[in-house]
Image (cartoon, rainbow, N blue to C red):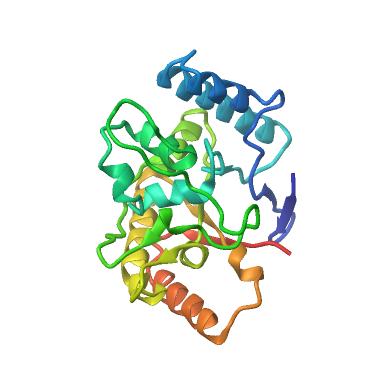
């Protein structure tokens, strides 16, 4: 757990972490998810167990004296996949299956060959285990409508708020979102800047309505050796995005 400390005027000091391990002290999330895959428990039981785990972790962080606590750092599979569902970047091969939201999520995460018509291939990395670029199972096409479609980030903020914890929601940043996306021939990242900025600003507005004061963007793509074009893309995204933050403070987090 990485702790950062911010010192303000006088003796005011705040402490924070960038996220908290989701698996559980005894790997509860792993074992519960495996039970769900084996149809030993229902989807409702899986979601209830995940909710309990989030509450436990928020309280652990709070009891350790951390004053700024993140939310939406939890994931059933992968935070980038969560962002794809949040912004409607889900392949038609999954959307067209007669599946619940959770079934669609796991269909893209691990494949689906079930009884509800059709099949799809799982979300995966190119080049074996090397995390370079997501395969075309999450690619952006001319017909892709990037928009706010999911609600996980809002649900988990509300969960924490009901426990008396006003969290700082975390989401994959727009630059990394585009850097990790694949694109149909004739389509480029710049084509999605305006729609992606509008979708993120909807997130700002909704979180502000719910009472949030801050949001964290995870931008691991910033540690790469960026080309001039990629730097220009970053500046274009953030100049437009930060022009209207809906009153939120924006924290950009990356790695070293």
Question: Which residue occupies the foreground of this view, 114 or 14?
Answer: 114
Identified at 35% across, 38% down, the residue is: 119
- Residue 169 visible within the image: no
- Residue 25 visible within the image: yes
> Quick check: 96 left or right of 56?
left
Question: Which residue occupies the foreground of this view, 84 or 219?
Answer: 84
Residue that protrudes farthest toward the top in the picture: 40
Residue 175: image x %, image y %?
Answer: 50, 68
Residue 242: image x %, image y %?
Answer: 44, 70
Rendering quarter of residue 27: top right
Residue 202: image x %, image y %?
Answer: 33, 56
Identified at 55% across, 39% down, the residue is: 74
> Quick check: 64 left or right of 165?
right
- The C terminus: image quadrant: bottom right
Residue that protrudes farthest toward the bottom in the picture: 228
**Vertical side of 103 occupied by 174: above or below:** below
Identified at 32% across, 53% down, the residue is: 148
> Quick check: 250 left or right of 155?
right
**Vertical side of 174 occupied by 30: above or below:** above
Identified at 41% across, 19% down, the residue is: 44
Residue 140: image x %, image y %?
Answer: 36, 63
> Quick check: 89 left or right of 61?
left
Question: Which residue occupies the foreground of this view, 253 or 111?
Answer: 111
Question: Which residue occupies the foreground of this view, 91 or 206?
Answer: 91
**Vertical side of 28 occupied by 218: above or below:** below
- The N terminus: image quadrant: top right
């Amino acid at each position: 757990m990485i702790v950062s400390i911010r010192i303000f005027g006088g003796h005011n000091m705040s402490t924070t972490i960038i996220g908290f391990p989701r698996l559980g002290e005894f790997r509860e999330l792993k074992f519960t998810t495996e039970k769900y895959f084996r149809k030993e428990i229902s989807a409702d039981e899986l979601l209830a167990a995940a909710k309990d785990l989030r509450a436990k972790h928020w309280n652990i962080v709070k009891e350790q004296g951390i004053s700024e606590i993140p939310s939406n750092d939890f994931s059933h599979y992968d935070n980038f996949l969560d962002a794809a569902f949040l912004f409607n970047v889900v392949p038609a091969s999954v959307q067209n299956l007669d599946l619940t939201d959770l079934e669609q999520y796991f269909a893209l995460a691990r494949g689906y060959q079930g009884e509800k018509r059709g099949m799809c291939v799982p979300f995966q990395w190119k080049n074996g285990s090397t995390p370079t670029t997501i395969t075309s199972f999450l690619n952006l096409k001319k017909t892709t409508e990037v928009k706010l479609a999911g609600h996980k980030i809002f649900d988990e903020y509300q969960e924490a708020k009901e426990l008396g914890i006003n969290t700082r929601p975390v989401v994959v940043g727009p630059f990394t979102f585009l850097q990790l996306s694949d694109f149909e021939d004739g389509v480029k990242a710049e084509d999605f800047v305006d729609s992606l900025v509008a979708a993120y600003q909807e997130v700002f507005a909704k979180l502000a309505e719910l009472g949030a004061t801050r949001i964290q963007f995870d931008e691991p793509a910033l540690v790469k050796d960026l080309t001039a074009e990629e730097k220009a893309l970053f500046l274009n995204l953030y100049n437009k995005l930060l022009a209207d933050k809906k009153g939120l403070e924006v924290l950009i987090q990356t790695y070293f």
